[in-house]
Image (spheres, rainbow, N blue to C red):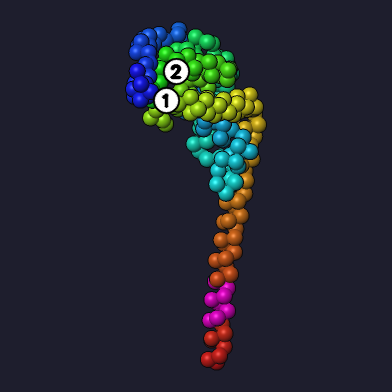
Amino acid sequence: MTMRNQMKTPQRRSTAPLPVPVTPSGLPEIREEAAKFDVDLNAFARVANPLARILNRPHYDDRLDDGDVALVRRIGGEIDIFRARWRTINQPATDEHIAGEMLRLTTTMATAGNLNPNLLNETLCGDVEELKPTLFALVRGCRAVRAKHKFLNICDLVQEIKKAERTARRYSYALEEFNQSEFEAELRAQIAADAAKASQWVVERKLRKRAKRNARTNVRSRDGGGDG
């Protein structure tokens, strides 16, 4: 075979199919729980303390609105349950969980045509295992890859899992640092401040009206005195 023919010959790659994904016990429930936490704790972490509200709102506003109060009271009223549920899903992922999620990605997402799917799956498992992700970060990161990216890419997956880990730390901090008594005290202080501000506004409005009436009276008096 000539050198030219050798160059034209396509490289042989394995066509052996990947096995059908086998979901580790409890993984579907973990995915569902992670999605619920993303809805509840993402908002909770933004409003549970004044500093978080200042950092996450325009104009550095740390006020609580009615929606904030309802959310924090709902989660705060069951804070111990939320903490226990969070600890369960925020524990380290096992090799079985990682293998299940990687196999799910490689069998449901498009990849480059010259990639060996078995080798890709093995590489993904190895790279993700080195990250030592939590269950939450694993399933959230994989969900983000499926939602945001058309093709499966190792770098994208690693970045999404790392991003999910940062989110998990934010959720953990919000849950562990939350104090119901301090929150209610802050709420009472805000209500008192709002009442004082409203009262001051009423007083100032009355003063402005009185000043306008006095001004009109003075004008009429001057006009009447000039005619006399």
Residue ID for mark 1:
152
Tell me the quarter of the picture where residue 28 sits: top left
Q: Decide: marks 2, 1 in contact (CB < 8 A)?
A: yes
Residue 66 appearing in the image: yes
Residue 10 appearing in the image: no
Q: Nearer the viewer, mark 2 or mark 1?
A: 2
Between 79 and 158, the one lying in front of the other is 158
Q: Position of residue 108 (x, y in %)?
A: 36, 20
How far separated are the C-alphas under marks 2 and 1? Answer: 10 Å
Q: Residue furthest front?
A: 2
Residue at image position (53%, 15%) is 126
Residue range highlighted in magenta: 213-220
Residue at image position (61%, 55%) is 200
Magenta span: chief secondary structure: helix
Label 1 sits on a secondary structure element that is: loop
Residue at image position (53%, 19%) is 128
Residue 213 versus residue 72 in the image, above or below = below
Q: Position of residue 130 (x, y in %)?
A: 58, 17
Q: Amino acid at mark 2?
A: Leu
Q: Amino acid at mark 1?
A: Leu
Checking the image for residue 16, the label placed there is none
Residue ID for mark 2:
120
Residue at image position (57%, 75%) is 215
Residue 140 versus residue 28 in the image, above or below = below
